[in-house]
Image (tube, grey):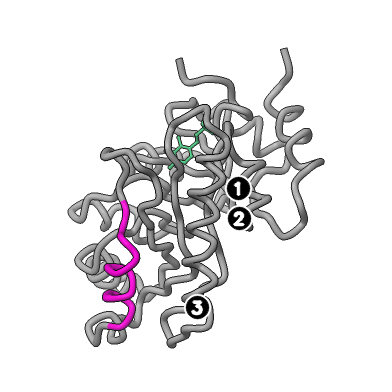
Amino acid sequence: MMTIAENLKNIYEELPENVHLVAVSKTKPVSDLMEAYQGGQRIFGENKIQEMTDKWEQMPKDVQWHMIGHVQTNKVKYMAPYVSLIHGVDSLKLLKEINKQAKKWRRVIPCLLQVYIATEETKFGLAQNELLEIIHSEEFKALEHIKVVGLMGMASFTEDQEKIRKEFQFLKDVFDYIQPYQLANCHFQHLSMGMSSDYKIAIESGSTIVRIGSNIFGSRG
Ligand SMILES: *Cc1c(COP(=O)(O)O)cnc(C)c1O
């Protein structure tokens, strides 16, 4: 059995320099996160706000916490003091709530807009026209305590590598299309795509942030 630190080292060895690794630690105990931390990892991803906040309280303060799951509006307040990046933002309503909570802490919270790229009905995210509608709206332009720094997407859960590649390529095309569009609170620099099973395809398709859980910490059972 390989240790968490060894798994991390192996992934980093083949990760291009411009690609950031989020260690997805959902459901895992703090002792596992600490092993990764001692192996040098500083960015951790969680999909539940309560669990992330518990871990934030226990872990060293130089950890960057990324919220990668679907965010309920009424829970934004719990992570507003500390969250580093919210990946799954999929509505103007949620952006407004993040803005409101960030303002209380005099922060600007970086966000990624989640785009729907899979063909499954269960995946969250914006359609391309909804994305454009949000970033071109006057309401969005008035939000001073959020900053949209890129896009996030999840490919279909399938063995079909070509299908996955097409979905990632679609997201890269959307990214390239809106990349020149810039506002004070909007600058597309990051593309969060790729998990344990498909991150290599994602990197080939232009990902700059991969979110890897089971390949580091083992399966979640
Ligand atoms: C759980 C999760 C991951 C990591 O999945 P693995 O297959 O364990 O690498 C990545 N992104 C999101 C949004 C997740 O919920």
**Which residue corresponds to the image point at 19% horizontal and 66% vertical from the top-left?**
93
Name the image quarter holding the N terminus.
top right
Q: Amino acid at mark 1?
A: Ala
Q: Based on the displayed image, in which of its 4 quarters is residue 142 positioned?
A: bottom left
Work out how far the residue at label 1 is from the one at label 2, CA to CA, in angstroms. Answer: 5 Å
Q: Are marks 1 and 2 in contact (CB under 8 Å)?
A: yes
Work out how far the residue at label 3 is from the one at label 2, CA to CA, in angstroms. Answer: 16 Å
Q: Which residues are the magenta region?
A: 125-136
Name the image quarter holding the C terminus.
top left
> Taken as a whole, is the magenta stretch helix, strand or loop?
helix
Q: Are marks 1 and 3 in contact (CB under 8 Å)?
A: no
Q: How many marks?
A: 3
Q: Amino acid at mark 2?
A: Ser
State left or right for residue 83 relative to residue 40.
left
Residue underneath mark 3: 187
Residue underneath mark 1: 202
Query: Residue 106 location in percent, x, y?
Result: 36, 76
* Image: 38 above or below 178: above
* Label whose residue precedes the other's in the sequence (3 or 2): 3
Query: Residue 66 location in percent, x, y?
Result: 47, 51
Residue underneath mark 2: 207
**Which residue corresponds to the image point at 40% horizontal and 42% vertical from the top-left?**
52
**Which residue corresponds to the image point at 43% horizontal and 62% vertical from the top-left?**
112
Secondary element under disc 2, as helix, strand or loop, is loop
**Which residue corresponds to the image point at 47% horizontal and 66% vertical from the top-left?**
174
